[in-house]
Amino acid sequence: MVPARDAADRGLPRSAFGRAYRGLVAGVDKISYVLIVVITAVMTTTVTAQVYYRYVLNDSIDWADEVSRLTFVWMIFLALPHGIRSGAHVGIDILVNALSQRLREPLFRLTSAIAVGLFMLIIVQATRVGIAVWDQPMPTLPISTGMFYVALIAGSAHSVLILLVFVLGLEAEPRHAEDDA
């Protein structure tokens, strides 16, 4: 991952709020990374065990499909904000690249602010749906189907935290690997 350029790199003042906020986001990032590793290990172990049971023992683990699906969804939504931070998501930037750097940064901050609004809408709607389905358990696990929506809410909330770093100008837009070539 290419480290994002921070406020000091661009000559922006470093406020106490900015340092505290960036520290909060860094802490959430670390927790998220650990959860991604643990969840990936659970998913990989579950799928491997299911394959072994199915093809070697001619049996199956009833709950393996649900655990692998749930862990996959959690892994994706926990990884989403890290992709935002590093600029790893697909984008069409032909028009943006035609702009001067002086215009790119405010445009990036504006689109980040719009993305914050969209993620907030996702959080509200996912909360509403999650509450509506919370009393529905998964077929083979004593877990609510609402846990899928909790993953969406967690990933969206983390994405909002990261996008606000850009909106507030605490970091510049992420550099892409091809920018360094």
Image (tube, rainbow, N blue to C red):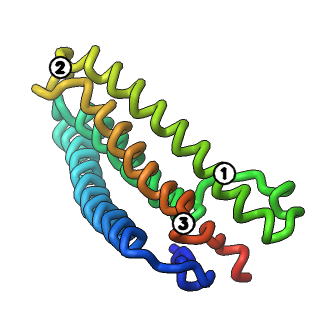
Q: Nearer the viewer, residue 34 or 162?
A: 162
| Image coords of residue 96 (percent x, y) | 81, 58
**Mark 3 crowdedness (10 Å alpha carbons): few <14, some 14-19, many ≥20:** some
- Could you say whether the residue bearing mark 3 is in a helix, strand or loop? helix
* Residue in the foreground of this view, choosing between 65 and 28: 28
Task: Report how far apart the C-alphas of labels 2 and 1 lie in the structure.
Answer: 41 Å
Residue 167: percent from left, percent from top: 56, 57
Residue 137 falls left or right of residue 179: left
Task: Tell me if label 3 and label 2 are in contact, CB under 8 Å.
Answer: no
Q: Residue at x 20, y 15 (%)?
A: 136
Name the residue rendered at 38%, 37% in the picture.
152
| Left or right of 24, for residue 166 | right
Cα separation, mark 3 vs mark 2, equals 36 Å
Point out the tag, 3 or 1, that comes first from the N-terminus.
Answer: 3
Q: Is residue 142 left or right of residue 76?
A: left
Which residue, given by chain and number where applicable, does mark 1 sit on? 110
| Three-letter code, disc 3 | Ser
**Vertically, is 14 above or below 60?**
below
Is 107 left or right of 96, judged from the image as shown? left
- What residue is disc 2 on? 137
Note whether 181 is above or below 43 in the view shown: below
| Amino acid type of the residue tagged 1 in the rendering | Leu
- Does residue 177 show up? yes
Disc on the earlier residue, 2 or 1: 1
Q: Residue at x 20, y 47 (%)?
A: 49
- Circle 1 SS class: helix
Mark toward the viewer: 3 or 2: 3
Kindly identify the amino acid type of the residue bearing the numbered disc 2.
Pro
**Label 3 or label 2, whichever comes before in sequence order:** 3
Label at residue 86: 3
